[in-house]
Amino acid sequence: MRSLASPPRSLRTRLVLIATVLATCAVLLCQTAGLTVLRSWLTDQVDDRLTGFRPPTRLYEDIADGRLPTPKDDDALPSDYRVYFYDSDGHLMEESLGLTDDRGPRLPTRAAGLGLRGDELATVEARDGGGSWRVVTDSGPDGMRAVVSLPLDTVDGATTKLLWFSAFLGVVVAAGVAVLGNAAVRLGLRPLSRVEGTAQQITDGALDLRVPDTDPDTEVGRLGQALNTMLDRLRTALHRTAASERQMRRFMADAGHELRTPLTAIQGFAELLHDDPRMPAERRTEAHALIATNANRMSRLVDDLFLLAKLGYAPGPHHEPVDLLSLAADSITSTAVHHPTRTITLEPLRTGSADTSGQELDVVEAVGDGHQLAQVVTNLLDNACAHTPASARIHLRVGTIRTSPAAGGVDRPGRTSAAPALSPGTVAAVIEVADTGPGLTPDDAQHVFDRFYRAAPADAGEPGSGLGLAIAAAIAAAHQGRMELDTRPEAGCTFRLLLPAH
């Protein structure tokens, strides 16, 4: 159990308690100062009355001769003054002026016991033990002395009443500050309470909520802005993490599926060869060929996956000037070995509607890794040959453009890409592979750069791994470039690689 002496944990309670203590201390301090000033002022008034009164010389002579009769109560001076006399030997005399009751100051029997010099003033206790008196001494003839006194009942009464009033006022102020301060603190902390409630709901899982109070002129508003910024970043990070996890699960499932097919084929043909040692030589040769084909397919798939992983985590490709025209010509030669019946033309890039036939190709350079860029162009040519009928024409174009919706590099309807658009007007070196095949549907075009995505090939050849265009897009992104596609059904496909011009 929490100790009763431990401080309150609630901020609201602490604020109210602090305000109450401070207000009460301020009231008591002011009342104490007022009480001190009032008592000093009243005492000064008594002192002025005492110093303004001096017994006449004849009164000393009458007292010494015993000619001053003792007045009756009804003949006493109508005043609070009390006057006492010491004879020439310093003894306190019985004769005095003033009321003859038991009230009066407690004076020593010897004048030396007064301890007063000249016009010094002092406060002494009353004879009856209640209250006090203010006294001053006066020197008379023949060494006589007189003590003039006035009671401080008025001063004590006024200060006592003011003291009780101060205590009562302190209690009232403390109670008022506690009640009103609690209401004021609740009202002032209401925005912070809303922030607290919103934060609790977000903690419980409502991640789409935002802090409502964002006034930049208040501390709570600035806190709300900071929390909203933090929540936006948190939501973005969570969405990215979720998307990455989904992509990773999909990637692992697709990779497992792609690897399972050749592994199953290899396992099946290997078991067939093992279980049937008397298999005819022709069938044995066919089984060996199928095992080698599937092993080669699995090897290529693993190489492609390794290349994608390397592109995703490598610091960057090797940078050197690359002649894109020579690279395109070499890629055409390499593709012709695998597709000898296809005709691929090398042309300058169209930058308008004019006919480009007969134009000479200029040197086009970019900075990057020549081997990786050659792999991109070869993948694009292989895809064009695999996914278009034999009658379709394939054009490989090389040139330099300024990015725009018409020329490329900028998003527009009918154009898809896995990379963000380049700034309009950016000078870029371009390698473009265009065909006159059937084109792609909008749905296929949206997923063409996804890993393991395959559109149906036009011929009955061996299906690819679905990683070629994903690798091409990754290589383009590693070169600070962009891979994009312009297509529509029955209008062919145009794959465009854009790189920063050298």
Image (cartoon, rainbow, N blue to C red):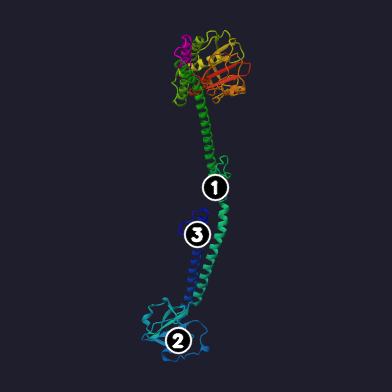
Position in image of residue 77 (x %, y %): 51, 85
Identify whether 289 is placed above or below 418: above
- Which residue is labeled 3 in the image? 22
Q: CA distance from mark 2 to mark 3?
A: 53 Å
342 displayed left or right of 130: right
Label disc, if present, on residue 96 of the rendered structure: 2
**Residue type (three-letter) at the residue carrying disc 2:** Ser
Label 3 close to label 1 by CB (< 8 Å): no
Marks 3 and 1, how far apart at CA: 28 Å
**What label does residue 283 carry, if any?**
none
Comparing 491 with 147, the one in front is 491
- Examine the structure image and report whether residue 361 is included in the region drawn in magenta: no
- Most foreground residue, 494 or 427: 494
Q: Label 2 vs label 1: CA separation?
A: 80 Å
Determine if the magenta segment contains residue 288.
yes
Main secondary structure of the magenta stretch: helix
Report helix, strand or loop for mark 2.
Answer: strand
| Residue 90 horizontal/vertical position (percent) | 37, 85
Q: The residue tagged with tag 1: helix, strand or loop?
A: helix
Q: Which residues are magenta?
A: 275-297
For marks 3 and 1, the one nearer the N-term is 3
Mark toward the start of the polypeptide (2 vs 3):
3
**Mark 1 crowd level (few <14, some 14–19, many ≥20, 10 Å Cα):** few
Say whether residue 438 is left or right of residue 381. right
Q: Establish if 101 lies above or below 353.
A: below
Residue type at mark 3 is Leu
Q: Nearer the viewer, mark 2 or mark 3?
A: 3
Residue 196's tag is 1
